[in-house]
Amino acid sequence: MSSITKKETNFRLLNLPNEIVDHVLSHVPKSDLPKLCIVSKSLRRAAEPFLYSDVTFCWVDIGTTPPIVPLLRTLFKRPELFALIDKVALRGPCLGESTRPRLNTTETPVHQFLEVIEQSRVPYRTGWIVNLRSGQMDAIAALLISNLTKTTRLSVQHNFIGGHDFAGKVLRSKIFGSLPRFTRLKEIRYVKSLDYPISEENIISEIALSLFYVPTVTHLVATIPNPKVFRWPRAEPNLDHLVSLDIQWLIEPFLGKILALTRNLKSLSWTWIYCDNRSQGWESAFLNFDKIIETVSQVKVHWRYSSFGPLSVSMGKFRPGT
């Protein structure tokens, strides 16, 4: 095998039918795909869809940060690569505001990223830039999300949307504002722990409720804190497209307002969360099972799956359900 030249390998592989080439490349370890991309331009065009189709970062250690900046540097150098991204998963447990590390901005092409933010023309771009300069991960994740259009599955959790959550604001701008919209999004997961500095601003609830307005989404998972008054950000959405729903935190009266609009729901999971130092009278430490049954009974569908729990209760400190 060592006597076979790169040119011969390239010729033999690319002379095969496209279906066979794709099947072969689908079994190549992702760590080896960059090597194929430098063999030739033709092989790069064949391999890149497999290299960029799945973007997954898991941030679980305060001592390390995921290599999202090098990816963004490449994507903004070649924006056409954004169209190849089918799945994005930004995962990780909540590290906490005080322990969540910031990115080393000396290794970040700040000027390149600032230009992208300025061109977005979103009203919150000044704050976005401030967070970017200070190395906040939510500002970096927002850069990635803002340019996604053909992604079918998107998951953003805790550490990537901490603090003032510019990634969440970008999501809202993609749904209601001027940023490029999702055209094929089917599954979305938005799971954010409570950040006390913004809890009273109700930002988390507004962003989470905005996700219901993506008309292509069939599966939705969201953490929705309880607002004082439940209010849709726009006119009531048409939720006929939803078949699977996983809601965390929201109390049963507000859950009922969502379920009343679902007609084709096949799967429902609800995790109730109580936070004593978050609640100010409109949340209760007690569950009203009669009200829960009444809430769920209004959904006139054929259930395939339903789940309630586990109940996650934290007296004095928020603990997200899983």
Image (tube, rainbow, N blue to C red):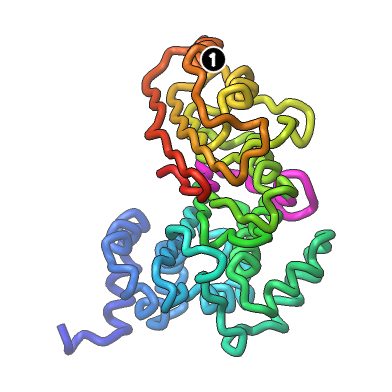
| Residue denoted by label 1 | 291
Disc 1 residue crowd, few under 14, some 14–19, many 20+, Cα 10 Å: few
Indicate yes or no whether the magenta region holds residue 260.
Answer: no
Q: Nearer the viewer, residue 238 or 230?
A: 230
Boundaries of the magenta span: 173-191
Q: Is residue 122 above or below residue 282?
A: below
Q: In this orientation, does residue 43 appear?
A: yes
Query: In the drawing, does residue 220 fall left or right of residue 77?
Result: left
The percent coordinates of residue 73 (x first, y second) are 58, 78
Indicate yes or no whether the magenta region holds residue 176.
Answer: yes
Residue drawn at x 79%, y 66% is 125
Residue drawn at x 71%, y 45% is 202
Q: In this orientation, does residue 119 appear?
A: no
Q: Nearer the viewer, residue 212 or 248?
A: 248
Amino acid type, callout 1 = Lys
The percent coordinates of residue 257 (x first, y second) are 65, 22
Q: Nearer the viewer, residue 39 or 219?
A: 219
For mark 1, give the secondary structure: helix
Rendered-image quadrant of the N terminus: bottom left
The percent coordinates of residue 221 (x first, y second) are 50, 39
Rendered-image quadrant of the C terminus: top left
Query: In the drawing, does residue 96 fall left or right of residue 37?
Result: right
The percent coordinates of residue 264 (x first, y second) are 52, 19
Q: Which quadrant of the view contains residue 36?
A: bottom left
Q: Is residue 186 above or below residue 266?
A: below
Q: Which quadrant of the view contains residue 232?
A: top right
Residue drawn at x 28%, y 72% is 12
Residue drawn at x 39%, y 26% is 307
Q: Is residue 248 above or below residue 20?
A: above
